[in-house]
Image: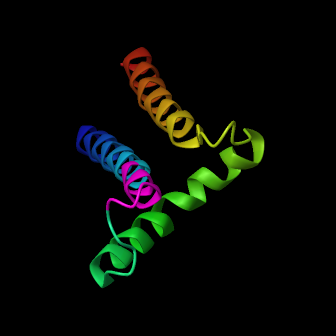
Amino acid sequence: MTTLIILLFRLIDLYMWLVIAAAIFSWLIAFNVVNYQNRFVALVGDFLYKVTEPALRPIRNIVPIMGGLDLSPLILLLLLWFLKRLILDVLSATL
């Protein structure tokens, strides 16, 4: 059971890093630091979009983009952190 919980925590951590990478990647594209015409950059961008967009889209429907600032990655990171703490608290209460 402990191994499954550790695996779940690692998967949540990995997803958190993917959300951070997608946010940074979107900034790099927006400020023309990287060129989206490059095949590798487009491949990485599509992967990050497909992985993170299903979780970010419902948050974007609730929280509007304010002044060009998209807060949905930050909210998703907070929700994932809260989920980890909730799982940890529930497990510690049952043991």
Residue at 27% x, 45% y: name it.
10
Please provide the residue range marked out in magenta: 24-33
Which residue in the rendered view is the most extreme toward the bottom? Answer: 39
User: In this rendering, is residue 47 above or below 26?
Assistant: below
Between 57 and 64, the one lying in front of the other is 64
Is residue 53 in the magenta section? no
Residue at 74% x, 41% y: name it.
64
How far across and how far down the image is residue 45, in percent?
Answer: 40, 69
Between 14 and 83, the one lying in front of the other is 14
How far across and how far down the image is residue 92, in percent?
Answer: 37, 18
Locate residue 5: give its quadrant: top left
Helix, strand or loop: magenta stretch: helix
Is residue 31 in the magenta section? yes
Residue 15 appears left or right of 7 = right
Residue at 39% x, 24% y: name it.
88
How far across and how far down the image is residue 82, in percent?
Answer: 49, 27
Residue 15 appears left or right of 62 = left
Q: Quadrant of the C terminus?
A: top left
